[in-house]
Amino acid sequence: MALGSRIDLREDEVELVAIRAQGAGGQNVNKVSNAIHLRFDIGASSLSDELKERLLRTRDQRISADGVVIIKAQAHRSLERNRVDALSRLRELIARAAFVPTTRRATKPTRASQIRRVEGKVRRGAVKLLRGRVNDQAKG
C-alpha cells in the first residue's frame, strides 16, 4: 500500500519562513507576519529514492521545476496554526505520492453468471414483446 509505514520529516529539511499574509485583516495584517512560507527540497531530503521519484512525477503546481515543494499557509490568524497547516499539507502531499494502488487482475465471469445474464435478457425481451398492439380481429 505505502512505500514507508510512516512518513517522518526531519526539521532541518523543512524551511519555514514567517511572512505577512495577504488579504483583508485591517491594521493587524500590515504589522504581524502570521503566514508561513514552507520550502521542502525533495532531492536533498532523506526520503527513499523511490518516494522522491514518485513525488517528482506527480503533477502538482506546488512542486517547482527544480524539485522544491513550496506551500504558503495563511488561512488562520495564528502563526502556529498556519505552521501546523503547512506541515500537514506537506505530509498529505507526500502520503499521496507514497500510496501505490494495487494492480487489478482481470477475471472472467463464471459460467453460471453468464447464463443468469442471458436468461434475464430473454425474460426482459419477452415482457417487451407483450407490449405490442392489441389485435382488433378478436372482437368480430
Image (cartoon, rainbow, N blue to C red):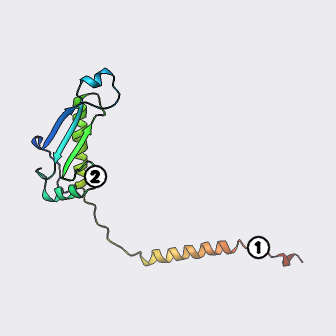
Identify the residue shown where x is 27% and y is 24%.
30
Which dot marks residue 96? Answer: none
Quadrant showing the C terminus: bottom right
Residue wearing tag 1 = 133
- The answer to which image quadrant residue 103 occupies is bottom left
Pointer 2 or 1: first along the chain: 2
Horizontal and vertical percent position of residue 43: 13, 53
Residue 19, image x, y percentages: 22, 32
Q: How dense is the environment of label 2, judged by Cα within 10 Å: few (below 14), some, or many (20 and up)?
A: few
**Residue 100 percent across, percent down from the top left:** 25, 59
Mark 2 or mark 1, whichever is nearer to me: 2
Q: Specify the quadrant that holds the N terminus.
A: bottom left
Which residue of the protein is positioned furthest toward the right in this rendering? Answer: 140
**Crowd around label 1: few <14 · some 14–19 · many ≥20 (10 Å):** few
Q: Secondary structure at mark 1?
A: loop
Element carrying mark 2: loop
Q: How many numbered marks, from 0 up?
A: 2
Q: In the image shown, does 52 or 32 lie closer to the viewer?
A: 32
Residue 55, located in which quarter of the rendered image? bottom left
Residue drawn at the location 21% of the way across and 53% of the way down: 65
Q: Amino acid at mark 1?
A: Arg
Please, is residue 47 above or below residue 21 in the view? below
Residue type of the residue flagged with mark 2: Asp
Nearest the eye: 140 or 4: 4
Q: Is residue 1 found left or right of 117 in the rendered image? A: left
Circle 2 is placed at which residue position? Answer: 60
